[in-house]
Image (spheres, coloured by chain):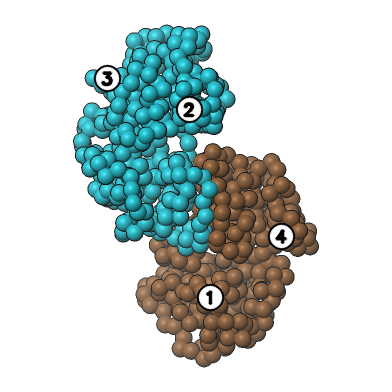
Chain colours: A cyan, B brown
Amino acid sequence: MRAIVYTAAGGPEVIALRDVPAPEPGAEQVRVRVGAAGLNRADVIQRRGRYPAPPGWPKDIPGLEYAGEVESLGPGVTRWRVADRVMGLVGGGGHAEFVVVHQDEALPIPAGMSLSDAAAIPESFLTAYDALVLRGRLQPGDRVLIHAVGSGLGTAATQLARRLGAGSVLGTSRTGEKLDRARAYGLDIGIDTSHTGFRDAVTPPVNVVLDVLGGPAFADNLAVLAPRGRLVLLGFLLGGAVQTDIDVILRKRLEVIGTAMRTRALEERVPLVREFTERVIPWFAGGAGAPLQPVVGATFPMSEMAAAHAFMEQNESFGKIVLTW
Amino acid sequence: MRAIVYTAAGGPEVIALRDVPAPEPGAEQVRVRVGAAGLNRADVIQRRGRYPAPPGWPKDIPGLEYAGEVESLGPGVTRWRVADRVMGLVGGGGHAEFVVVHQDEALPIPAGMSLSDAAAIPESFLTAYDALVLRGRLQPGDRVLIHAVGSGLGTAATQLARRLGAGSVLGTSRTGEKLDRARAYGLDIGIDTSHTGFRDAVTPPVNVVLDVLGGPAFADNLAVLAPRGRLVLLGFLLGGAVQTDIDVILRKRLEVIGTAMRTRALEERVPLVREFTERVIPWFAGGAGAPLQPVVGATFPMSEMAAAHAFMEQNESFGKIVLTW
């Protein structure tokens, strides 16, 4: 099969499309012919030589999610049939023509949705759901602050927060136009951080923050949280080094919760996939509220992965960047 | 009634014993004649002019816990009768001859226990239980690190961790003799931090840390936690300013949980008091395990409160400092 490989650690020029052996499905595994796959910051960081794949996943093929059709079944598969349309997370190997996954970690693609739209769902929506509901324990009426609200994760979190009954959804971006576009997905208050911080703009305080920034945003996140608020850390685009005063963590009884999808073991991913399948997948069809929408900001052929990386590093995409075969 | 008042912010010399009006019990409140009351770090910090009492509690009388006898009942009290022996937390006012509390936030004193022993229970054991079970979500087999393990809180947390099925209880102290004494209460591994840090001594990593140190201990606490570990912050004796790298919080998916008893509203204290009364109070009588023991390191008459403060500031006490009328 064809797959993306990184020939070295470095810039987009290390990205190559190679022929490699296709993976074989084992017991209770399915092999999926990938039609489309999202690009994530983690792929860029892995390309630079950091964030290697966790044990058990392809070390040499990047890609953390996929959407496609079940192509063959390993022994003991009962959940899927050949040609079923599925999507999901992988610890690596998503940027390839085939992925092999356990039958219980694949999700059904919502009826009528294209594979390139579906490819924008797994990382963004599973991460956002996990962060808001399971880590951040969002309650109806809660005020939520979502950093980088124009990203795939940000647009997913905005829609989910709305659907989960958040009182207000606040979001930051360094691009005013992204804030305008995010309003269509349920953003109430957009905070343009191109020239100033967000600390003074968040008032009254919020109950949950989803952060991908880190660095100087860390102390500001603590400052804008209400008593018993939850700061969910999902990344540190501005750097990992932080200085802060933990007095505020005690005084307001805050929680700082680090999370990541990639390193989770199968036993932990499966209950999340099940809960998401039962509760959230129906929301893409509508039901009692506006339908959830995967937000695809740009689509590239898989053969132009290097251009897709370069585009991501320009931070100009609104929503997900998706690669298609 | 007589009560301790701080005549100004400052050293132990600002402490005075004064005659003040006794509080009157309102609806569903009881008035307790205090026999003994614990001294806490928070009292010392309040004396220095920081950490004022939360709204609804005496501003001018310190003291965060009490043990005594119900002296009179407000309207609607059904839970207690005059002369019942009770103990509990207050947001302030414990260093007085009488306190007034809601009937549902008082706890029964274990049968046969002296008031001065009982006075060593509420802050230490409720805080430790809340921190280990409700904040730290201690699981049987978990490894726990308890800083300042020779303190009232530390000796309570050690015993509770043991009782809750912790796999190993590790503790730090800057006094080797306190580590030796803490072994009698269930400490497995004592780490003397008089000359070096604890980071290298904690191996393998732990699942829960109870910290009262803050400052430079913060980053070390994150370093010694296992994946999905919980750092419960209860104080910052070494200072609130911290520098760290949040990379470790994400990578290991850690949680940093700030907590404090004093600022909690009645609605939040009552369920904790109920759970503690049903589950933990019987453990002071034994049951299936060694009986819990309040650890009283020193007892002073209430009239010598200044000496008690000075003693606490020398950090030489093992266990609680208790004041008696």
Cα gap from disc 3 to disc 2, whole angstroms: 31 Å
Residue at disc 4, secondary structure: strand
Please, which chain is the residue tagged with disc 2 on? A
Mark 1 or mark 3, which is nearer to you?
A: 3
Numbered badge on residue B63: none
Residue depicted at 60% across the width and 59% down the height? B215
Q: Residues within 10 Å of mark 4 (few under 14, many from 20)?
A: many
Between the C-alphas of marks 4 and 3, the distance is 61 Å
Cα separation, mark 1 vs mark 4, equals 24 Å
Q: Is residue B2 left or right of residue A131?
A: right
Chain of the residue displaying label 4: B
Distance Cα–Cα, label 1 vs label 3: 63 Å
Residue, disc 1: B46
Mark 2 packing: few (<14 Cα in 10 Å), some, or many (20+)? some
Name the residue at 62% across, 82% down.
B12
**Circle 4 residue:** B173
Whole-percent x, y for residue A223 in the image? 41, 58
Q: Amino acid at mark 3?
A: Ser
* Tags 4 and 3 on a common chain: no
Do the residues at pointers 2 and 1 share their chain?
no
Q: Chain of mark 1?
A: B
Q: Provide the residue designation for mark 2.
A: A11
At a point 54% along the width and 90% down the height, the residue shown is: B18
For residue B102, side relative to residue A51 (left or right): left
Going 78% across and 60% down the picture, which residue do you hit?
B176
Q: Chain of mark 3?
A: A
Which labelled disc corresponds to residue A114? Answer: 3
Residue B227 point in image, percent of width and height: 57, 39
Amino acid carrying mark 4 in the image: Ser
Q: Earlier in the sequence, mark 1 or mark 4?
A: 1
Query: How far is the residue under mark 2 from the one under mark 1?
Result: 56 Å
